[in-house]
Image: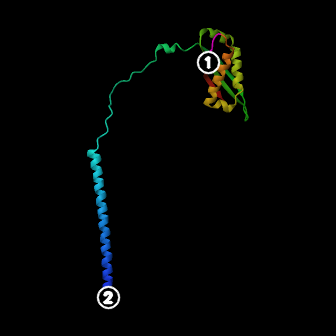
């Protein structure tokens, strides 16, 4: 019986060894396939794939385009509003605005009227800005809003022409 047990152990160890050989064979086949696929990909990318078209690199000098002189004549006469300081609405303390403006007018005739009405224009500016809050004047949208309101308000009392644009030449909110 001892011989039967030894014989069974030998058969089991041969079966286990034979199964290990099959596993090694499968691993070798998979590794060979991976190597073949890698080699095939390398051949494709190095030899068979067409290179991308090269961008034409020319050493042409670029000319600066200058606007025609006609566009410069579209700028109307300008009126400066000297620096002023105005308190603004604030819940958390005292805030003020220090600003200077330039008004672009649409014709020369309104230039004389604007100079005559400068106290009215300064009053309109001070009242409009003084009724704004600190938060409204901090961002870009608030500044654009104040410019539109100033343009509308000043145009309401000018008779000989209109304001084309309002330029904030100095604007500090503190």
Q: Which percent across, then down, holds residue 93? A: 73, 34
Vertical placement of residue 105 versus 170, above or below: above
The residues bearing labels 1 and 2 have C-alpha atoms spaced at a distance of: 114 Å
Element under label 1?
strand
Vertical placement of residue 39 versus 162, above or below: below
Question: Badge 1 is on which residue?
Answer: 102
Query: Quick one: quadrant of the C terminus?
Result: top right
Q: Principal SS element in the magenta part?
A: loop
Residue 174 in sight from this viewpoint: no
Residue 163 highlighted magenta (yes or no) = yes
**Mark closest to the chain's N terminus, 1 or 2:** 2
The answer to which of 160 and 118 lies nearer the viewer is: 160
The answer to which of 132 and 17 lies nearer the viewer is: 17
What residue is rendered at 30% in x and 82% in y?
10
Q: Which percent across, then down, holds residue 50? A: 28, 41
Question: Badge 2 is on which residue?
Answer: 4
């Amino acid at each position: 019986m001892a011989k039967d047990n030894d014989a069974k152990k030998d058969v089991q160890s041969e079966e286990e060894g034979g199964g290990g050989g099959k596993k090694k064979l499968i691993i070798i086949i998979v590794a060979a396939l991976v190597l073949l696929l890698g080699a095939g990909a390398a051949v494709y990318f190095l030899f068979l794939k067409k290179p991308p078209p090269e961008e034409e690199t020319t050493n042409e000098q670029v000319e600066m385009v200058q606007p025609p002189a006609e566009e410069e004549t579209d700028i109307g006469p300008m009126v400066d509003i000297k620096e002023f300081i105005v308190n603004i609405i604030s819940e958390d303390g005292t805030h003020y605005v220090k600003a200077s403006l330039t008004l672009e007018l649409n014709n020369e005739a309104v230039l004389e009227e604007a100079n005559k009405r400068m106290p009215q224009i300064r009053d309109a500016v001070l009242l409009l800005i003084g009724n704004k809050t600190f938060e409204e004047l901090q961002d870009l949208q608030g500044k654009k809003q104040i410019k539109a309101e100033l343009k509308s308000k000043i145009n309401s009392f000018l008779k000989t022409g209109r304001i084309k644009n309002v330029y904030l030449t100095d604007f500090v909110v503190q």
